[in-house]
Image (tube, rainbow, N blue to C red):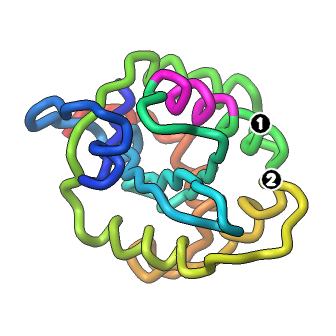
Amino acid sequence: MLTLRLTKDLLKDMKTTPAEDINAAPFLSWHVNIYNLNKRKHIVFVNDLTRLAIIIDGIRTGQLERLKDKFLLTFRDYLLQEGVDESLINRYLVNGAEVVISKTNNRSVLGTMKEVTWFIEDDFNDNIERLKWLNRTIHKPIDYMEPISYFKESLWDHKNYNTV
């Protein structure tokens, strides 16, 4: 089960109510927030375990299903561009076939999300290039590793798919 932990602002924007106390594996849990980048509304997703960041745009108020679909599509495209084996991506997505909406619960992940959204303007022509740059930024909570490297390592470990 894939858990999307939306901030209060995004819950309000998506006009949805969260499920209560979802206990999900950190590898299958993502904190999600809304922010402005290049004067357009974007949605940023940060993985709880690896701090991998995915950014999408083109989502309007109340389009929760579109948000889920576009996230999964962008996630798949990005990992393929990073050279991740498609069978590993499919295994991750099968484990996260069901998507549940919840509230944020980890201040450390929110802090990382704030770092990811530090820039309000950039000059990337392509979102994949933006993600490649962002996910090569080291973070203290993951022992100063790059999120993409840690995510690739974590895909192989079956323990990461188990609920805590």
Q: Position of residue 156 (x, y in %)?
A: 56, 39
Instruction: State the residue at coordinates (78%, 54%).
Output: 127
Quadrant location of the N terminus in the rendered image: top left
- Dots 1 and 2: beta carbons under 8 Å? yes
Residue at 72%, 59% (x, y): give it: 131
Structural crowding at the residue carrying mark 1, measured as other residues with C-alpha within 10 Å and reported as few (<14), some (14–19) or many (≥20):
few
Kind of residue indicated by mark 2: Ile
Nearer to me, 74 or 64: 64
Q: Which mark is residue 128?
A: 2
Q: Is residue 92 left or right of residue 95?
A: right
Q: Indicate left or right for 76 with 106 as reference.
A: right
Q: Is residue 70 magenta?
A: yes
Return the residue nearer the eye: 23 or 71.
Answer: 71
Hey, which residue is sitting farthest left in the picture? 20
Q: Tell me, yes or no, if residue 154 can be seen here.
A: yes
Residue 43 pos. (x, y %): 53, 51
**Residue that numbered label 1 is attached to:** 77
User: The residue under label 1 is which amino acid type?
Assistant: Asp
Indicate whether residue 57 is drawn in magenta. no
Q: Give the camera-side residue of 118 and 58.
A: 58
Would residue 159 be visible to someone looking at this image?
no
Is the magenta region chiefly helix, strand or loop?
Answer: helix
Residue located at (44% from left, 68% from top): 113
**Which numbered dot is residue 134?**
none
Where disc 1 sits, the SS reads helix
**Which quadrant of the rendered structure holds the C terminus?**
top left
The image shows residue 39 at horizontal and vertical percentages of 66, 67
**Horizontal placement of 70 versus 43: left or right?**
right
Chain part drawn in magenta = 65-73
